[in-house]
Image (cartoon, helix red, strand yellow):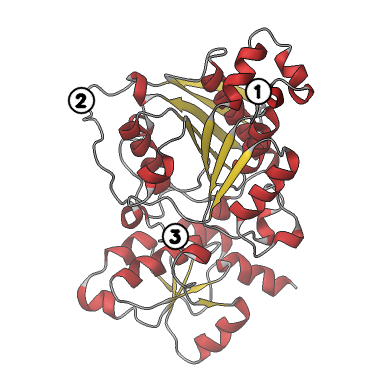
Amino acid sequence: MSEQGALGPRYARQRRLPELGDAGQERLAASRAVVIGAGGLGAPLLSYLAAAGIGSLTVVDPDLVDLTNLHRQVLFTPADVGRAKAEVAAERLTLQNPEVEVRAVVDAVTPATALDLLAGHDLVLDGSDNFPTRYLASDACEILRLPLVWGSILAFSGQVAVFRADAGGPTYRDLHPVPPRPGEVPSCAEAGVLGMLCGVIGSTMALEAVKVLTGMGDPIQGRVALYDALRSRWDELPLARDPSRAAVTALEDLRVTCALPGPSGPAGSAAAPEVLPVELPALLAAGVRVIDLRESAEIAERGAVAGAEHVPLAELLALTGEARAALEGAVLLCAGGTRSGSAQRVLAEHGVGVRSLRGGAEALRALRTR
Protein backbone atom coordinates (compact mmCIF):
# COMPACT_ATOMS: atom_id res chain seq x y z
CA MET A 1 0.00 0.00 0.00
CA SER A 2 1.34 3.42 -0.93
CA GLU A 3 1.81 6.14 1.66
CA GLN A 4 -0.87 8.14 -0.13
CA GLY A 5 -3.25 5.20 0.22
CA ALA A 6 -2.47 4.72 3.89
CA LEU A 7 -3.26 8.35 4.63
CA GLY A 8 -6.13 8.66 2.15
CA PRO A 9 -9.76 9.48 2.92
CA ARG A 10 -10.75 5.80 3.28
CA TYR A 11 -9.18 5.72 6.76
CA ALA A 12 -9.97 9.30 7.80
CA ARG A 13 -12.33 8.39 10.66
CA GLN A 14 -9.91 6.04 12.39
CA ARG A 15 -6.89 8.26 11.71
CA ARG A 16 -8.73 11.00 13.58
CA LEU A 17 -8.39 8.96 16.78
CA PRO A 18 -5.36 10.38 18.63
CA GLU A 19 -4.46 6.90 19.92
CA LEU A 20 -4.05 5.73 16.31
CA GLY A 21 -3.39 8.79 14.15
CA ASP A 22 -1.40 8.89 10.92
CA ALA A 23 1.56 7.08 12.49
CA GLY A 24 -0.61 4.14 13.53
CA GLN A 25 -2.25 3.99 10.10
CA GLU A 26 1.14 3.87 8.44
CA ARG A 27 2.17 1.04 10.76
CA LEU A 28 -0.94 -0.88 9.74
CA ALA A 29 -0.21 -0.31 6.07
CA ALA A 30 3.30 -1.69 6.54
CA SER A 31 2.13 -4.76 8.48
CA ARG A 32 1.79 -8.35 7.33
CA ALA A 33 -0.61 -10.69 9.12
CA VAL A 34 -1.53 -14.31 8.57
CA VAL A 35 -4.95 -15.64 9.51
CA ILE A 36 -5.39 -19.36 10.14
CA GLY A 37 -8.98 -20.25 9.36
CA ALA A 38 -11.44 -18.41 7.11
CA GLY A 39 -14.53 -19.74 8.89
CA GLY A 40 -16.72 -18.38 11.66
CA LEU A 41 -13.97 -16.34 13.32
CA GLY A 42 -11.98 -15.71 10.17
CA ALA A 43 -14.88 -14.09 8.30
CA PRO A 44 -15.36 -11.09 10.63
CA LEU A 45 -11.73 -10.65 11.62
CA LEU A 46 -10.55 -10.75 8.00
CA SER A 47 -13.22 -8.25 6.98
CA TYR A 48 -12.28 -5.78 9.68
CA LEU A 49 -8.54 -6.12 9.16
CA ALA A 50 -8.93 -5.52 5.43
CA ALA A 51 -11.23 -2.56 6.06
CA ALA A 52 -8.75 -1.09 8.54
CA GLY A 53 -6.04 -0.99 5.87
CA ILE A 54 -3.57 -3.63 6.99
CA GLY A 55 -0.95 -3.94 4.28
CA SER A 56 -0.91 -7.68 3.62
CA LEU A 57 -3.13 -10.59 4.64
CA THR A 58 -2.41 -14.29 4.15
CA VAL A 59 -5.50 -16.51 4.50
CA VAL A 60 -4.79 -20.17 5.31
CA ASP A 61 -7.66 -22.68 5.17
CA PRO A 62 -7.90 -26.12 3.54
CA ASP A 63 -11.70 -26.40 3.62
CA LEU A 64 -14.47 -25.86 1.12
CA VAL A 65 -17.57 -23.75 1.69
CA ASP A 66 -20.47 -25.87 2.94
CA LEU A 67 -24.14 -24.92 3.21
CA THR A 68 -23.96 -25.35 7.00
CA ASN A 69 -21.30 -22.60 7.14
CA LEU A 70 -23.52 -19.82 5.87
CA HIS A 71 -25.34 -18.92 9.09
CA ARG A 72 -22.10 -17.66 10.62
CA GLN A 73 -19.38 -17.41 7.96
CA VAL A 74 -20.60 -14.15 6.49
CA LEU A 75 -17.96 -13.82 3.77
CA PHE A 76 -19.70 -16.56 1.80
CA THR A 77 -22.92 -16.95 -0.20
CA PRO A 78 -24.83 -20.01 -1.48
CA ALA A 79 -23.06 -19.55 -4.82
CA ASP A 80 -19.74 -20.25 -3.06
CA VAL A 81 -20.69 -23.73 -1.81
CA GLY A 82 -18.05 -26.22 -2.91
CA ARG A 83 -15.35 -23.59 -3.47
CA ALA A 84 -12.18 -23.18 -1.39
CA LYS A 85 -12.80 -20.85 1.55
CA ALA A 86 -9.39 -19.21 1.35
CA GLU A 87 -9.83 -18.34 -2.33
CA VAL A 88 -13.35 -16.97 -1.89
CA ALA A 89 -12.22 -14.94 1.14
CA ALA A 90 -9.33 -13.47 -0.85
CA GLU A 91 -11.70 -12.44 -3.64
CA ARG A 92 -14.16 -10.79 -1.24
CA LEU A 93 -11.44 -8.94 0.68
CA THR A 94 -9.87 -7.63 -2.52
CA LEU A 95 -13.24 -6.29 -3.60
CA GLN A 96 -13.73 -4.78 -0.17
CA ASN A 97 -10.36 -3.02 -0.14
CA PRO A 98 -8.18 -3.25 -3.27
CA GLU A 99 -5.36 -1.49 -1.38
CA VAL A 100 -4.75 -4.62 0.71
CA GLU A 101 -2.61 -7.44 -0.68
CA VAL A 102 -4.39 -10.75 0.00
CA ARG A 103 -2.86 -14.19 -0.56
CA ALA A 104 -4.88 -17.41 -0.33
CA VAL A 105 -3.30 -20.66 0.88
CA VAL A 106 -5.67 -23.58 0.31
CA ASP A 107 -3.94 -25.96 2.67
CA ALA A 108 -3.77 -26.99 6.30
CA VAL A 109 -1.07 -25.81 8.68
CA THR A 110 1.08 -28.85 9.44
CA PRO A 111 4.32 -29.41 11.37
CA ALA A 112 6.09 -29.61 8.01
CA THR A 113 4.71 -26.30 6.69
CA ALA A 114 3.95 -24.13 9.74
CA LEU A 115 7.28 -22.34 10.10
CA ASP A 116 7.51 -21.47 6.41
CA LEU A 117 3.87 -20.34 6.26
CA LEU A 118 4.09 -18.04 9.28
CA ALA A 119 7.61 -16.68 8.84
CA GLY A 120 7.86 -13.20 7.39
CA HIS A 121 4.67 -11.96 9.02
CA ASP A 122 4.35 -9.49 11.87
CA LEU A 123 1.37 -11.16 13.53
CA VAL A 124 -0.53 -14.46 13.48
CA LEU A 125 -4.26 -14.78 14.15
CA ASP A 126 -5.56 -18.25 14.96
CA GLY A 127 -9.24 -18.72 14.23
CA SER A 128 -8.97 -22.49 13.73
CA ASP A 129 -11.53 -24.93 15.06
CA ASN A 130 -9.36 -27.80 16.31
CA PHE A 131 -6.83 -28.38 19.05
CA PRO A 132 -3.86 -29.68 17.01
CA THR A 133 -3.83 -26.54 14.88
CA ARG A 134 -4.08 -24.30 17.96
CA TYR A 135 -1.10 -25.98 19.59
CA LEU A 136 0.81 -25.91 16.32
CA ALA A 137 0.15 -22.19 15.75
CA SER A 138 1.20 -21.36 19.30
CA ASP A 139 4.35 -23.48 19.13
CA ALA A 140 5.36 -22.07 15.74
CA CYS A 141 4.87 -18.51 17.03
CA GLU A 142 7.02 -19.30 20.05
CA ILE A 143 9.80 -20.60 17.82
CA LEU A 144 9.50 -17.68 15.40
CA ARG A 145 8.99 -15.14 18.21
CA LEU A 146 5.78 -13.82 16.70
CA PRO A 147 2.78 -12.44 18.59
CA LEU A 148 -0.37 -14.55 18.31
CA VAL A 149 -4.00 -13.48 18.65
CA TRP A 150 -6.13 -16.52 19.50
CA GLY A 151 -9.87 -16.97 19.71
CA SER A 152 -12.31 -19.85 20.08
CA ILE A 153 -16.06 -20.32 20.19
CA LEU A 154 -18.52 -23.04 21.15
CA ALA A 155 -22.28 -22.82 21.60
CA PHE A 156 -22.78 -19.49 23.44
CA SER A 157 -19.23 -19.01 24.78
CA GLY A 158 -16.11 -17.41 23.34
CA GLN A 159 -12.53 -16.78 24.40
CA VAL A 160 -9.84 -14.35 23.21
CA ALA A 161 -6.21 -13.90 24.24
CA VAL A 162 -2.97 -12.44 22.93
CA PHE A 163 0.03 -14.74 23.40
CA ARG A 164 3.43 -13.05 23.42
CA ALA A 165 6.09 -15.69 23.80
CA ASP A 166 8.38 -13.19 22.07
CA ALA A 167 8.03 -11.02 25.19
CA GLY A 168 8.30 -13.91 27.67
CA GLY A 169 4.54 -14.17 28.12
CA PRO A 170 2.27 -17.20 28.32
CA THR A 171 1.21 -19.21 25.30
CA TYR A 172 -1.60 -21.59 24.46
CA ARG A 173 0.34 -24.37 26.20
CA ASP A 174 0.14 -22.43 29.45
CA LEU A 175 -3.63 -22.19 29.06
CA HIS A 176 -4.06 -25.85 28.06
CA PRO A 177 -0.93 -27.78 29.14
CA VAL A 178 -2.35 -31.17 28.10
CA PRO A 179 -4.03 -31.74 24.71
CA PRO A 180 -7.56 -33.17 25.07
CA ARG A 181 -8.21 -36.78 24.26
CA PRO A 182 -10.21 -37.71 21.15
CA GLY A 183 -13.90 -36.96 21.68
CA GLU A 184 -13.29 -35.23 25.02
CA VAL A 185 -14.34 -31.79 23.75
CA PRO A 186 -17.18 -31.54 21.20
CA SER A 187 -16.77 -29.52 18.03
CA CYS A 188 -19.13 -26.77 16.89
CA ALA A 189 -20.60 -29.30 14.44
CA GLU A 190 -21.57 -31.45 17.41
CA ALA A 191 -22.39 -28.90 20.13
CA GLY A 192 -23.66 -26.11 17.87
CA VAL A 193 -22.71 -22.44 17.78
CA LEU A 194 -24.62 -19.17 17.63
CA GLY A 195 -23.65 -17.30 14.46
CA MET A 196 -23.58 -13.84 16.05
CA LEU A 197 -21.04 -15.08 18.62
CA CYS A 198 -18.56 -15.46 15.77
CA GLY A 199 -18.95 -11.77 15.03
CA VAL A 200 -18.30 -10.78 18.65
CA ILE A 201 -15.17 -12.91 19.05
CA GLY A 202 -13.83 -12.40 15.52
CA SER A 203 -14.20 -8.62 15.75
CA THR A 204 -12.48 -8.65 19.14
CA MET A 205 -9.57 -10.58 17.62
CA ALA A 206 -9.29 -7.98 14.85
CA LEU A 207 -9.28 -5.20 17.45
CA GLU A 208 -6.52 -6.94 19.41
CA ALA A 209 -4.50 -7.34 16.21
CA VAL A 210 -4.70 -3.61 15.47
CA LYS A 211 -3.66 -2.83 19.05
CA VAL A 212 -0.64 -5.12 18.82
CA LEU A 213 0.44 -3.83 15.41
CA THR A 214 0.10 -0.15 16.27
CA GLY A 215 1.05 -0.18 19.96
CA MET A 216 -2.35 1.26 20.84
CA GLY A 217 -4.10 0.51 24.12
CA ASP A 218 -3.75 -2.54 26.36
CA PRO A 219 -3.97 -5.89 24.51
CA ILE A 220 -5.38 -8.99 26.20
CA GLN A 221 -1.99 -10.28 27.39
CA GLY A 222 -1.44 -12.28 30.56
CA ARG A 223 -5.17 -12.95 30.71
CA VAL A 224 -7.95 -14.62 28.76
CA ALA A 225 -11.15 -12.74 27.98
CA LEU A 226 -14.23 -14.97 28.35
CA TYR A 227 -17.54 -14.00 26.76
CA ASP A 228 -20.93 -15.44 27.71
CA ALA A 229 -23.43 -14.57 25.00
CA LEU A 230 -26.46 -15.60 27.04
CA ARG A 231 -25.51 -13.18 29.82
CA SER A 232 -23.89 -10.63 27.48
CA ARG A 233 -21.00 -10.49 29.91
CA TRP A 234 -17.21 -10.49 29.69
CA ASP A 235 -15.08 -12.08 32.40
CA GLU A 236 -11.30 -12.48 32.67
CA LEU A 237 -9.02 -15.34 33.63
CA PRO A 238 -5.46 -14.44 34.71
CA LEU A 239 -2.81 -16.38 32.81
CA ALA A 240 0.92 -16.63 33.51
CA ARG A 241 3.70 -18.59 31.88
CA ASP A 242 4.52 -21.80 33.70
CA PRO A 243 8.15 -21.33 34.83
CA SER A 244 8.71 -25.08 34.74
CA ARG A 245 7.58 -25.43 31.13
CA ALA A 246 10.46 -25.87 28.73
CA ALA A 247 10.61 -23.54 25.76
CA VAL A 248 9.24 -24.99 22.53
CA THR A 249 12.05 -25.72 20.08
CA ALA A 250 10.37 -28.18 17.67
CA LEU A 251 6.91 -28.81 16.30
CA GLU A 252 4.96 -31.96 17.02
CA ASP A 253 2.05 -33.56 15.19
CA LEU A 254 -0.98 -33.87 17.47
CA ARG A 255 -3.41 -35.08 14.81
CA VAL A 256 -3.48 -38.64 16.12
CA THR A 257 -3.56 -37.54 19.77
CA CYS A 258 -6.58 -35.31 19.16
CA ALA A 259 -8.03 -37.24 16.20
CA LEU A 260 -7.74 -34.48 13.65
CA PRO A 261 -8.07 -35.28 9.93
CA GLY A 262 -4.97 -34.98 7.83
CA PRO A 263 -4.77 -32.54 4.92
CA SER A 264 -7.59 -33.06 2.44
CA GLY A 265 -9.50 -31.23 -0.23
CA PRO A 266 -8.07 -29.35 -3.18
CA ALA A 267 -4.50 -29.14 -1.88
CA GLY A 268 -4.30 -32.47 -0.11
CA SER A 269 -5.08 -36.10 -0.70
CA ALA A 270 -8.17 -37.33 -2.47
CA ALA A 271 -11.40 -37.02 -0.50
CA ALA A 272 -11.96 -39.95 1.83
CA PRO A 273 -14.95 -42.20 1.00
CA GLU A 274 -18.23 -41.25 2.63
CA VAL A 275 -21.61 -42.89 3.01
CA LEU A 276 -24.73 -40.82 2.43
CA PRO A 277 -27.50 -41.08 5.06
CA VAL A 278 -29.92 -42.52 2.48
CA GLU A 279 -27.46 -45.36 1.80
CA LEU A 280 -27.11 -46.53 5.41
CA PRO A 281 -30.26 -48.73 5.69
CA ALA A 282 -29.20 -50.83 2.71
CA LEU A 283 -25.69 -51.24 4.11
CA LEU A 284 -27.07 -52.36 7.47
CA ALA A 285 -29.36 -54.84 5.72
CA ALA A 286 -26.37 -56.20 3.84
CA GLY A 287 -24.55 -56.86 7.10
CA VAL A 288 -21.99 -54.06 6.87
CA ARG A 289 -20.55 -53.21 10.27
CA VAL A 290 -21.71 -49.75 11.41
CA ILE A 291 -20.01 -48.22 14.45
CA ASP A 292 -21.37 -45.29 16.46
CA LEU A 293 -18.47 -43.28 17.94
CA ARG A 294 -20.57 -40.98 20.13
CA GLU A 295 -20.33 -40.96 23.90
CA SER A 296 -23.00 -42.76 25.92
CA ALA A 297 -24.46 -39.47 27.15
CA GLU A 298 -24.89 -38.25 23.57
CA ILE A 299 -26.72 -41.41 22.57
CA ALA A 300 -28.94 -41.22 25.64
CA GLU A 301 -29.89 -37.64 24.77
CA ARG A 302 -30.28 -37.92 20.98
CA GLY A 303 -31.10 -41.59 20.50
CA ALA A 304 -29.28 -44.63 19.18
CA VAL A 305 -28.94 -45.58 15.53
CA ALA A 306 -30.70 -48.90 15.04
CA GLY A 307 -28.31 -51.62 14.00
CA ALA A 308 -25.16 -49.68 14.89
CA GLU A 309 -22.51 -50.96 17.26
CA HIS A 310 -21.42 -48.52 19.97
CA VAL A 311 -17.67 -47.99 20.34
CA PRO A 312 -16.71 -44.53 21.70
CA LEU A 313 -14.08 -42.75 19.65
CA ALA A 314 -11.30 -42.98 22.24
CA GLU A 315 -11.82 -46.75 22.57
CA LEU A 316 -11.82 -47.25 18.82
CA LEU A 317 -8.58 -45.35 18.33
CA ALA A 318 -6.99 -47.39 21.12
CA LEU A 319 -7.58 -50.67 19.26
CA THR A 320 -4.50 -52.46 17.97
CA GLY A 321 -3.58 -55.61 16.06
CA GLU A 322 -6.42 -57.89 14.97
CA ALA A 323 -9.09 -55.74 16.64
CA ARG A 324 -8.02 -52.73 14.59
CA ALA A 325 -7.71 -54.78 11.38
CA ALA A 326 -11.26 -56.10 11.93
CA LEU A 327 -12.56 -52.56 11.38
CA GLU A 328 -11.76 -52.85 7.66
CA GLY A 329 -14.83 -51.95 5.58
CA ALA A 330 -16.87 -50.61 8.49
CA VAL A 331 -18.94 -47.42 8.42
CA LEU A 332 -18.24 -44.96 11.22
CA LEU A 333 -20.69 -42.36 12.47
CA CYS A 334 -20.76 -39.65 15.14
CA ALA A 335 -23.04 -36.69 15.79
CA GLY A 336 -22.16 -34.54 12.80
CA GLY A 337 -19.48 -36.40 10.85
CA THR A 338 -16.43 -34.67 12.33
CA ARG A 339 -15.17 -37.38 14.66
CA SER A 340 -15.97 -40.19 12.23
CA GLY A 341 -14.00 -38.41 9.50
CA SER A 342 -11.11 -37.91 11.90
CA ALA A 343 -11.10 -41.57 12.93
CA GLN A 344 -11.29 -42.58 9.28
CA ARG A 345 -8.11 -40.73 8.43
CA VAL A 346 -6.25 -41.92 11.50
CA LEU A 347 -7.14 -45.54 10.67
CA ALA A 348 -6.09 -44.99 7.06
CA GLU A 349 -2.61 -44.09 8.31
CA HIS A 350 -2.52 -47.60 9.85
CA GLY A 351 -3.68 -49.25 6.63
CA VAL A 352 -7.30 -49.80 7.70
CA GLY A 353 -9.97 -48.60 5.27
CA VAL A 354 -13.33 -47.45 6.68
CA ARG A 355 -16.04 -45.06 5.55
CA SER A 356 -17.60 -42.11 7.35
CA LEU A 357 -21.31 -41.28 7.44
CA ARG A 358 -21.72 -37.79 6.00
CA GLY A 359 -23.49 -35.52 8.46
CA GLY A 360 -23.59 -38.22 11.15
CA ALA A 361 -26.53 -39.11 13.34
CA GLU A 362 -28.03 -35.64 12.99
CA ALA A 363 -28.23 -36.08 9.21
CA LEU A 364 -30.05 -39.36 9.78
CA ARG A 365 -32.50 -37.60 12.11
CA ALA A 366 -33.11 -34.89 9.52
CA LEU A 367 -33.70 -37.54 6.84
CA ARG A 368 -36.33 -39.28 8.99
CA THR A 369 -38.23 -36.03 9.62
CA ARG A 370 -38.58 -35.08 5.93
Q: Mark 3 points at which residue?
A: 296
Q: Is residue 82 above or below residue 178?
A: below
Residue 307 in percent (x, y) is at 49, 80
Which residue appears farthest toward the top when viewing the image? 18
Q: Distance between the residues labelled 1 and 3?
A: 60 Å
* First in residue order: circle 1 vs circle 3: 1
Which residue appears farthest toward the bottom when viewing the image? 286
Amino acid at circle 3? Ser
Amino acid at circle 2? Ser
Q: Mark 2 points at which residue?
A: 244
Q: Distance between the residues labelled 3 and 2?
A: 37 Å
Q: Quick one: 82 or 173, which is closer to the camera?
A: 82
Q: Quick one: 226 or 45, which is closer to the camera?
A: 45
- What number is the disc on residue 3? 1
Crowdedness near tag 1: few (<14), some (14–19) or many (≥20) residues, C-alpha within 10 Å: few
Q: In this view, does 105 lie above or below 290?
A: above
